[in-house]
Image (cartoon, coloured by chain):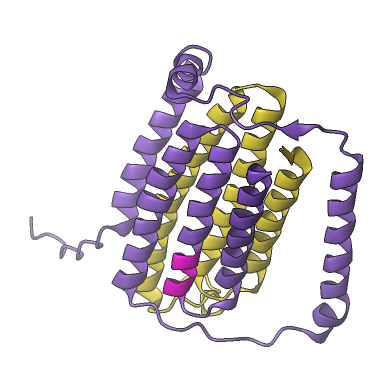
Chain colours: A yellow, B purple
Amino acid sequence: MVPLSYYLVLSGILFACGVTGFLIKRNIITIFMSIELMLNGVNLSFVAFAAQWHQLSGQVFVFFVMVVAAAEATVGLAIIIAVFRTRETLNVDQVNLLKL
Amino acid sequence: MLHLILFSVFGLVCVAGAINLLVQSHPINSALSLIVVMGSLAVEYLLLGAEFVAAVQVIVYAGAIMVLFVFVIMLLNAGEEERTKGSRVSLLIGIPGMIMGSVLMAWVLITHSGTHAVEAGALPGAPREIAQLLFHEFLLPFEVTSILVLIAIMGAVVLAARPEPLQPEGKN
């Protein structure tokens, strides 16, 4: 049997990796993937707590997180395509002006 | 015992994939290692007795969302990312501080959380129970998410559509 704290530590490691990637990466697509990694870490702790307290609502919340992640990925990738069309770059350091 | 071994193996694969995501400089390699992370997370969900969540994780996350990512990477022909030098202060103070903080947090969680072990299959995570909950108690949030997805679809179409060339004035 695995203690709940192991799951929480794993979820914390995943979240920290996501935050680190968000901060150190320069490619806008990789930054997006780091956000997905953070959401996955949170999902793991949701499911672990659901199993701990025998509450299925935790698993239902994971579905809502997944739906929001899917919507966010769709809109975000569309924004990335629009940015690439006007700037011709994916480096976030070169996308520093709101105006073209 | 088997439970713990499976947890450790797939947890290590998961962390290795997450670190590989940070180390790789080409976005396609990062995307593939993110798929590895999501697949091993699905196994962790199975260990927690959440079968339906594991299936949805593989289908939606590792399938649909990552296909979207790989598609955009291929479409935009994204190349290697340029490395920028980090500041010296972050190397000297930030990394030891981060390691100390994370070790402290893990120690507190493991020793003082006072939680008992999670048993395999302790929770009925079958689709039937999930559906009961989703379509009775959480019906309103469920409908709201469907509206959210609809808005996201329209937003994606509007944002990614090629802008129409401006019509000259008075030539209707």
Residue situated furthest front in the rendering? B1
Read off the magenta span.
Answer: B27-33
B116, above or below B34, in the image:
above
In the rendered picture of this protein, how many numbered marks are placed on residues? 0
> Is A41 on the left-hand or right-hand side of A63?
right
B55, above or below A18, in the image:
above
> Is B108 on the left-hand or right-hand side of A14?
right
> Is B111 on the left-hand or right-hand side of A26?
right
Q: Residue at x 81, y 81 (%)?
A: B91
Quadrant in which the N terminus of chain B appears? top right
Front-most of B151 and B14?
A: B14
Quadrant in which the C terminus of chain B appears? bottom left
> Residue B114 occupies which quadrant of the picture?
top right
B126, above or below B6, in the image:
above
Q: Residue at x 25, y 62 (%)?
A: B163
> Is B53 on the left-hand or right-hand side of B95?
left
Relative image position of residue A14 (x, y in whole percent): 65, 56
Relative image position of residue B59 (x, y in whole percent): 38, 44
B33, above or below B88, in the image:
above
Relative image position of residue A19 (x, y in whole percent): 67, 61
Residue situated furthest top in the rendering? B136
Residue A100 can be seen in this image: no
Residue B93 can be seen in this image: yes
Q: Residue at x 62, y 35 (%)?
A: A47
Q: Is residue A89 magenta?
A: no
Q: Residue at x 50, y 78 (%)?
A: A91
Front-most of B130 and B77?
A: B130
Relative image position of residue B157 (x, y in whole percent): 29, 50
